[in-house]
Image (cartoon, rainbow, N blue to C red):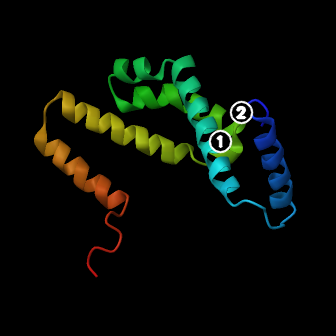
Amino acid sequence: MNRIINDSEVLEIVQKDLKKILAGEQVEDTRISSLLNVITQTTIDNIIDKTLETNNIVDLFIESKNFNKFKNKILPILINLEKKYPLIFGNRTSKNLLNWQYTFAFHDAFITQSEEKIEKLIDRFIELIAFPYNYES
């Protein structure tokens, strides 16, 4: 925490409230939850950014001729993330692969300028994420 929060007073409050949260006690300032969420999301973003850069994933994606070739190269990276950061990426490899597969399919449809393919992908993706959730009622 001291690497993320520079203000010693804020750091003290955060550490005090974190101890209370872990002990199941009431915190003094509920804004701590928002701050912790920002810190968590920033940390996750940094991990993802570093992974993208370190492994040249954008180049890997663009240079792969089909999704299976890309999958074979990215799968070890995803498994490594899952092992290294289980609270963030644990048991998410298949979902991450599905997201990459859709990204690859949309990219391919865009490159080939296939409006029909894009429309089908949009429909399948909307169905996959169940959006809008309760549109009939």
What residue type is disc 2 on? Answer: Ile
Task: Name above or below for residue 104 compared with residue 124.
Answer: above
Q: Position of residue 109 (x, y in %)?
A: 21, 35
Answer yes or no: is residue 90 visible.
no
- Residue identifier under label 1: 39
**Could you tell me which quadrant the C terminus lies in?**
bottom left
Crowd class of label 2 (few under 14; some 14 to 19; many from 20; radius 10 Å): few
Q: Residue at x 75, y 35 (%)?
A: 7
Q: Is residue 88 left or right of residue 63?
A: right
**Could you tell me which quadrant the N terminus lies in?**
top right
Q: Which mark is residue 48?
A: none
- How far, Cα to Cα, is label 1 from label 2? 8 Å
The reply to whether dot 1 and dot 2 touch (C-beta < 8 Å) is yes
What residue type is disc 1 on? Answer: Ile
Sequence-first tag of 1 and 2: 2
Crowd class of label 1 (few under 14; some 14 to 19; many from 20; radius 10 Å): some
Work out whether residue 4 or residue 127 is closer to the camera in this orientation and state it. Answer: 4
- Residue identifier under label 2: 4
Q: Position of residue 81 (x, y in %)?
A: 64, 34
